[in-house]
Image: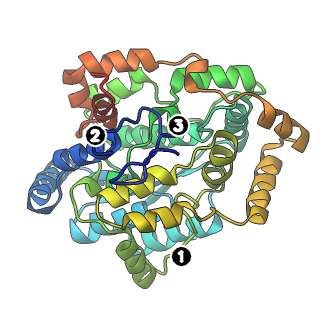
Amino acid sequence: MIKVCTKGIWNESVPGIKFDSDGVSNYYHLQKILENNFPRGEKGTEIWKNIIEDIKEKGKNNRYDCIIGVSGGVDSSYLLHVAKNVYGLRPLAVNLDNGWSTDIAVKNIQKITKKLNIDLETYVINYQEIKDLLRSYIRASLPWIDTPTDMAIKGALYKIANRENIKFILRGNDFRSEGKQPREWTYSDYKQLKYVHKMFGSGTKLKTFPFLNNFNLVYYGYIKKIKEVRPYYYIDYKKQEAKNMLMEIYDWQDYGGHHHENIFTKFAMSYWLPQKFGIDKRLIHLSAQVASNAISREEALRQISTPFETPEKLEDTKNYVLKKLDISQEEFLQIWKSPNKSFMDYPNNFVMIQKILKYGKPVISRIYKQKPMSFFEMEARNEK
């Protein structure tokens, strides 16, 4: 019988998991460490107040004092609302158009930016480029095939922030509702992306893709002093309440499950990962919500046992993705039957990055306003 954490629903399928004598996992302890390092309540309010003052001071002579990446989802939409209406910031909203956003997500972005009178910049990647990259990751049989999108979002945000002389990028991540995904499920990097594209791509030149390699990150963070900040680490944020407010005030529409505002991301999370790799990322999300007292353990177990969608809808999503990527059913079947790969099976910068995380803390603290999650994961997995 598979062992399950007594304080959540993390189980032995999660890489790097360990249990103490009480059956409590190191991922639960990681969650508590994160809560201590990024407190809410009175202490969190004070920290966030100081960050707000810093944002306003450093951006006082600019048209915008911060930049917010928007997807049309709950987290980023609500962040636009609180940034302007609650904290008086002057954000520039940036949306990455990779050709996979749902119509609902696009309309959500338009509605909220228009009503808040927030400028919106859409960073458009040539679809042939993103198509070749996503197809390459599928052919490589890596777990997290949406890596190119994640990298492009971050690259676009830094690129535009640098152009506009904006010093703060506000992100809508919330470990209390999302948890910390093990790197085995999601890791990739710039070096690996180039290799995978070279090996499995069709030779499409990446002219519009916003690359962000380690050198760029150091330049933007250390020289240009651009920092990422995650407000939900400190301010009281309840997703369901935020969703209700967005629907009432902005006519925001729900798009379904977590990250289902993007069709390819939906495919990656609800079809590719669970069916090919046996990975259900909801295990981490729901466990974090249990540990944060947002839902009961019983409710988490109920939700994890509920299918993402009906088999027919999942098949429809798969067929849509294959058609849009020009992957035949025959090729996909071959890929499906091929051995699953890990990020360690292809060239990457992981070992180098781990060394930087260990020995380069003074430099990293200049790049990130908040301690990166990778530090905490290393400590929780006894890799200090």
Q: Pointer 1: residues within 10 angstroms few (<14), some, or many (20+)?
A: some
Which quarter of the figure has residue 347? Answer: top right
Asked if one can make out residue 168 in the rendered structure from this viewpoint, the answer is no
Q: Which mark is residue 32?
A: none
Q: CA distance from mark 3 to mark 2?
A: 27 Å
Which residue is tagged 1? 253
Q: Could you tell which of marks 2 and 1 lies nearer the N-terminus?
A: 2
**Callout in the foreground (3, 2):** 2
Which residue is tagged 2? 21
Q: Could you tell which of marks 3 and 2 lies nearer the N-terminus?
A: 2
Q: Residue furthest right?
A: 330
Q: Pointer 3: residues within 10 angstroms few (<14), some, or many (20+)?
A: some
Label 3: which secondary element? helix
Q: CA distance from mark 1 to mark 3?
A: 30 Å
Label 1: which secondary element? loop
The residue sitting at 23% across, 40% down in the picture is 370
Which residue is tagged 3? 185
Looking at the image, residue 41 lies above or below residue 112? above
Asked if one can make out residue 38 in the rendered structure from this viewpoint, the answer is yes
Residue 244, given in percent of the width and then of the height, sits at 41, 79
Q: Label 3 sits on what residue type?
A: Trp
Q: Label 2 sits on what residue type?
A: Ser
